[in-house]
Amino acid sequence: MRQILLLILLFFVGQWFVKTLRRAQPQARPGADPRQPGQGAWRANGGAQGNGPGGSFGANDGGAKAGSNGSALPEPMVRCAECGVHAPRSESVSVGAQSFCSAAHERAYDARKTGQDRPAR
């Protein structure tokens, strides 16, 4: 009986210890901005934080642009009406209410739509 009670006690102590470590973990991250809770080193450094030895997680220019002006908001993505690929709004071509990933897809979409509007022979 003592062994079972000791195992139960060890289980609860272990759970308490894990919970305490998880609460303390976000506070101990290097580079975290204390003004924004839950923000890790990845966003605070503009997305250029490494992912393990030799890793380059988030090393593209997109994170650096967002961090350079002080805001870490992601850029809105729009869906191409021709192929369905999502592209950043700043890199897309918008014609009316339609958005396209490239000018070539805008022309192809326009050609396909105007071809459907022609009367059949």
Image (spheres, rainbow, N blue to C red):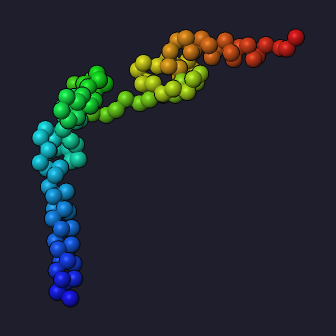
Above or below, 23 against 102 in this view is below
The quarter of the rendered structure image containing the C terminus is top right
Query: Horizontally, is 101 left or right of 47 in the view?
Result: right
Above or below, 40 against 96 in this view is below
- Residue at 20% x, 62% y: name it: 19
The image shows residue 111 at horizontal and vertical percentages of 67, 12
Would you say residue 41 is visible in this rendering?
Answer: yes
Farthest bottom residue in view: 1
Above or below, 91 against 54 in this view is above
- Residue at 34% x, 32% y: name it: 74
- Residue at 37% x, 29% y: name it: 75
- Residue at 26% x, 31% y: name it: 57
Query: Horizontally, is 109 left or right of 73 in the view?
Result: right
Q: Quadrant of residue 56?
A: top left
Would you say residue 69 is visible in this rendering?
Answer: no
The image shows residue 84 at horizontal and vertical percentages of 55, 27
Depth order, front residue of 63/98: 63
The quarter of the rendered structure image containing the N terminus is bottom left
Farthest right residue in view: 121
Q: Quadrant of residue 10?
A: bottom left
Depth order, front residue of 89/20: 20
**How many numbered marks are there?**
0
Depth order, front residue of 83/94: 83
The image shows residue 114 at horizontal and vertical percentages of 71, 13
The image shows residue 62 at horizontal and vertical percentages of 31, 24
Q: Quadrant of residue 119?
A: top right
